[in-house]
Image: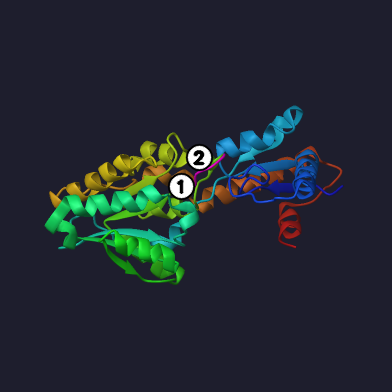
Amino acid sequence: GIPWVADFRDLWTEDCRYRADSPARRAADRRLEQEILETADAVIGVSPRQTEILAGHVPDQSEKFLTITNGFDPDDFTHIGRSLTQRGGQFVLAYVGRFDLSQTPESWFSALGKFVEEIGPDGDRFVLRIAGHVNRTAQAKLIATGVRCEIQGYLPHRDAISAMCQADALLLCSPSGPNGDTIIPAKLFEYLAASRPILTMGPTGSICERMVQSSRAGVCADFEEASIVDALHEVFSAWRSGTPMEGASGDSIQEFSRVRLTGKLAGVFDQIAVARPEWSVSRGELVAACDS
């Protein structure tokens, strides 16, 4: 009977990465999911479309569903001095995070190889830098493309932020599969805050594509080889000509500041406290219950 909030940072049984081969397991998961959706005082989704999907399971309670995305911490960027001017003789396309083959289409590797071939002698000026884990198979595929590749491995968070801000462009891979277009990789918010142009690759019309376009933060490609090659040329050619693309402006991304997002969550707790007066608990007590 205690007021509570269910916070879905991903979908559950309808997530494109959901793996449950047993019919009994799938049925159990769906039963538990439905119980949570029905009994929670409020349900939070991580993207608008994911919130709609969750709310569709209990259409008579749609008013208790809302969206609170992931975000970025402004304090993480106070130590960074950023400039949109050309940095030197090399263009660095950075990927920060775990580089998984499961989320990287084969067309990325063929497109990268074609792009490197097409830029010819300028291939020495293009560097793909990955800050994070890359397995051996992925490394072999990258090497086979002919791209100059630097793999830095895992970095402390502060250094990862610096790697984003020092890059000439940032690579984002969105998941494919059912409802993959509803997923916002958490790194996108820090990419936006880094004010570097983003090359996002994912399903046409995905939430990531719309966010990058609405914030004028870069270029978007689908999973087709030609689309990826064109996007690579666009960001590289702008840099090569001395007029590098810009990233998102600070004003366009303030809604994703964790300061604002935390205030939104606190507002949910306040609403529940008002709606359930029999539980005269303070906001602090609700937060403490969540933490426990």
- Name the residue carrying label 2: 181
Name the quadrant of the C terminus.
bottom right
SS under mark 1: loop
Left of 26 or right of it: where is 18? left
| Residue 80 visible from this viewpoint | no
- Crowding at label 2, few (<14), some or many (≥20) Cα neighbours within 10 Å? many
Query: Could you tell me what secondary structure mostly forms the magenta stretch?
Result: loop
Give the secondary structure at mark 2: helix
Task: In the rendered view, tell whether residue 200 sits above or below residue 146.
Answer: above
Closer to the camera, 66 or 21? 21
Q: Nearer the viewer, residue 215 or 182?
A: 182
Q: Quadrant of residue 56?
A: top right
Tell me what residue is drawn at x 43 percent, y 55 percent.
Answer: 190
The residue at the point 53 percent across, 44 percent down is 183
Q: Are marks 1 and 2 in contact (CB under 8 Å)?
A: yes
Which one is nearer the viewer's eye here, 5 or 226? 226
Is 175 one of the magenta-colored residues?
Answer: yes
Circle 1 residues within 10 Å: few <14, some 14–19, many ≥20: many
Provide residue 287's location: percent of width, then percent of height: 71, 56
Residues rendered magenta in the picture: 174-178
Looking at the picture, which amino acid does disc 2 mark?
Asp
Horizontally, residue 192 falls left or right of residue 282, namely: left
Q: What amino acid is at disc 1?
A: Ser
Asked whether the viewer can see residue 158, the reply is: yes
The residue carrying mark 1 is: 174
